[in-house]
Amino acid sequence: MSILEITQLAKSFRSGAETLCILEDVSLSLEVATVAVVTGESGSGKSTLLNLIAGLDFPSSGEIQCAGRRVSHLSEKELTDYRSRVIGLVFQFHYLLKEFTAEENVMLPSYMAGVAKRDARGKAIRLLTDVGLADRAGHFPHELSGGERQRVAVARALVNDPEIILADEPTGNLDERNSRVVEDVLFSLARKYGKTLILVTHDPELTNKGDRRFHIARRTVEEL
Ligand SMILES: Nc1ncnc2c1ncn2[C@@H]1O[C@H](COP(=O)(O)OP(=O)(O)OP(=O)(O)O)[C@@H](O)[C@H]1O
Ligand SMILES: [Mg+2]
C-alpha cells in the first residue's frame, strides 16, 4: 500500500520580479514503512520538498497524496490535524521548549491533540525509554547534551503516532558520535513502529541505510 504519492509536483518561489523554479515534474511513490534517504546539494530543494509533504507550504502545481489525503485540498482544520497526527517532524535544530522538561516536551503535542494528560505522559515515558533517555525525563533542555536533545525531539515527533516521519538533517548540528546515536534511534524506531521515514541528510554514511535513495538535482528527484 502506498503512503505517499507525489505526481508532477512543481514549486517555484517569487522573489521580487523573479520567479525561482526550485522543483519541477517531481513524481514518486512510497510504500508504507519505507525508509527513504534524500540527498542533494545545498539549495537543491530538500527542505522545500519536506515542507510540501508536511503541508507547511503548497505546490505551484501537481499533487501530493499522503496517508489517503490530498494535501493541497485540505481545509485549515484538516491541515492542522494532518500536521499533528499524520506527520512527525524532526529538524536540524531541536526546537524544544526551554521551560519544559524532556517529558513535558514529548507529551505536549499529544496533550494538545486532546489526549488525557496521564495517557500523554505514559506515551512520553515510553518513547523516552525507546530513545534511551528514561532517566532524563525530568531534565530541562539545557541540562541535556546536543545529541540527547535531538533524541528528545525524535521522541516528540513520534508521540502522536504519525504515519510518516520527516527528518530534515536531524544530525546536522551534531558531532560524529552523537550523529550515529541519533540516526540509530531514528532508524530503529521507524522500523520498530513500522513508520515511513523520509530522511534528508548530507551524511554519506547514512545513504546506504535506507530502503530507497533519492537525489535532488536539476530541479527534480531521481532515484539512485
Ligand atoms: N520561501 C522562500 N522564498 C524564496 N526562495 C526560497 C524560499 N524557500 C526556499 N527558497 C529557495 O529555494 C531553494 C531551495 O531551498 P531549500 O531550503 O529547499 O534547500 P535545501 O536543499 O534544503 O538546502 P540545504 O541543504 O542548505 O538545507 C533555495 O535556493 C532557497 O533560497
Ligand atoms: Mg534544507
Image (cartoon, helix red, strand yellow):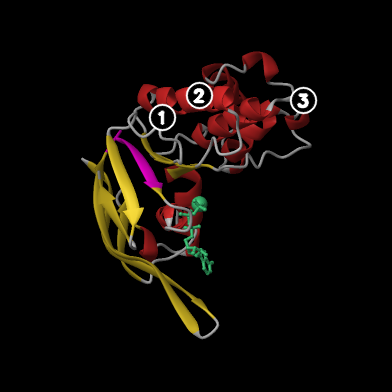
Residue corresponding to mark 3: 143
| Label of residue 205 in the image | 1
Give how far apart the Cα atoms at labels 3 and 1 are: 29 Å
> Element type at marker 1?
loop
Q: Which quadrant: the N terminus? A: top left
In the image, is residue 6 above or below residue 11?
above
* Residue 159, horizontal then vertical, whole percent: 52, 32
Is 84 on the left-hand or right-hand side of 138?
left
Discs 2/1, front: 1
The residue lying at 60 percent from left, 20 percent from top is 125
Task: Point out residue 142 in the picture as x, y percentages from the top left corner.
Answer: 77, 30
Tag 3: residue type?
A: Glu
Say which residue label 2 marks.
Answer: 180
Q: Earlier in the sequence, mark 2 or mark 3?
A: 3
The quadrant where residue 92 appears: top right
Badge 2 vs badge 3, beta-carbon distance below 8 Å: no
Q: Secondary structure at mark 2?
A: helix
Query: In the rendered structure, does residue 86 fall within the stretch colored magenta?
Result: no
Q: Is residue 129 above or below residue 81?
A: above
Q: Earlier in the sequence, mark 2 or mark 1?
A: 2
| Depicted 41 relative to depicted 8: above or below | above
Q: Answer yes or no: disc 3 within 8 Å of ligand 2.
A: no
In this view of the protein, can residue 14 be seen by the observer? yes
Residue depicted at x 51% and y 86%: 17
**35 magenta-colored:** yes
| Pointer 2 with pointer 1, Cβ within 8 A | yes
**Label 3 or label 1, whichever comes before in sequence order:** 3
Numbered range of the magenta stretch: 32-39
Local crowd size for mark 1, using a 10 Å CA cut-off: few (<14), some (14–19), many (≥20): few
